[in-house]
Amino acid sequence: MAQFLRDSYQLQDTFHVPVEEQLAMCFHILGHKLKNRVMRVDFMRSGETISRYFNKVLGAICVLRDEFLTQASNATPVEVESSTVWYPYFAVK
């Protein structure tokens, strides 16, 4: 993931914080629902630094979302339409 974000020019290493640490901070916050003050202690960085790199990583992920996510089709699968068990519940009235 880090190399992909580096290659797509979405994230770059800085003098003090490499891309891997930027990703670790962002995913740690998202995965554990942590506050900025907890992250300051865990990563030994200032709150401003944590916030800056969290926003950069989140922005990079949002830019790349079209490459990884596609819209689901609205068509009802044939298995559901042809089955009397499922289709009455999914019929449009």
Image (spheres, rainbow, N blue to C red):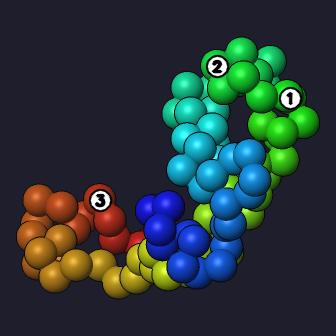
Residue nearest the viewer, comparing 36 with 19:
19
Q: What is the spatial separation of the Cα atoms under label 1 and label 3, in whole angstroms?
A: 51 Å
Q: In the image, 22: left or right of 75?
A: right
Q: What is the spatial separation of the Cα atoms under label 1 and label 2, in whole angstroms?
A: 11 Å
Question: Residue shown at 85%/28% (left/top)?
Answer: 46
In this rendering, the answer to whether 21 lies above or below 43 is below
Sooner in the amino-acid sequence: mark 1 or mark 3: 1
In this rendering, the answer to whether 76 lies above or below 45 is below
Please, what is the three-letter code of the amino acid marked with disc 1? Gly
Sooner in the amino-acid sequence: mark 3 or mark 2: 2
In this rendering, the answer to whether 9 lies above or below 43 is below
Q: Which residue is mark 2?
A: 42
**Label 1 neighbourhood size at 10 Å, few (<14), some (14-19), many (20+)?**
some
Image disc number at residue 47: 1
Where residue 61 appears, as percent x and y from the top left, is 62, 64
**Label 2 neighbourhood size at 10 Å, few (<14), some (14-19), many (20+)?**
few
Can residue 54 be spotted in the picture? no
For the residues bearing labels 1 and 3, Cβ distance under 8 angstroms: no
Rendering quarter of residue 57: bottom right
Where residue 48 appears, as percent x and y from the top left, is 90, 36
Please, what is the three-letter code of the amino acid marked with disc 2? Asp
Which of labels 1 and 3 is toward the front? 1
For the residues bearing labels 3 and 2, Cβ distance under 8 angstroms: no
Image disc number at residue 89: 3
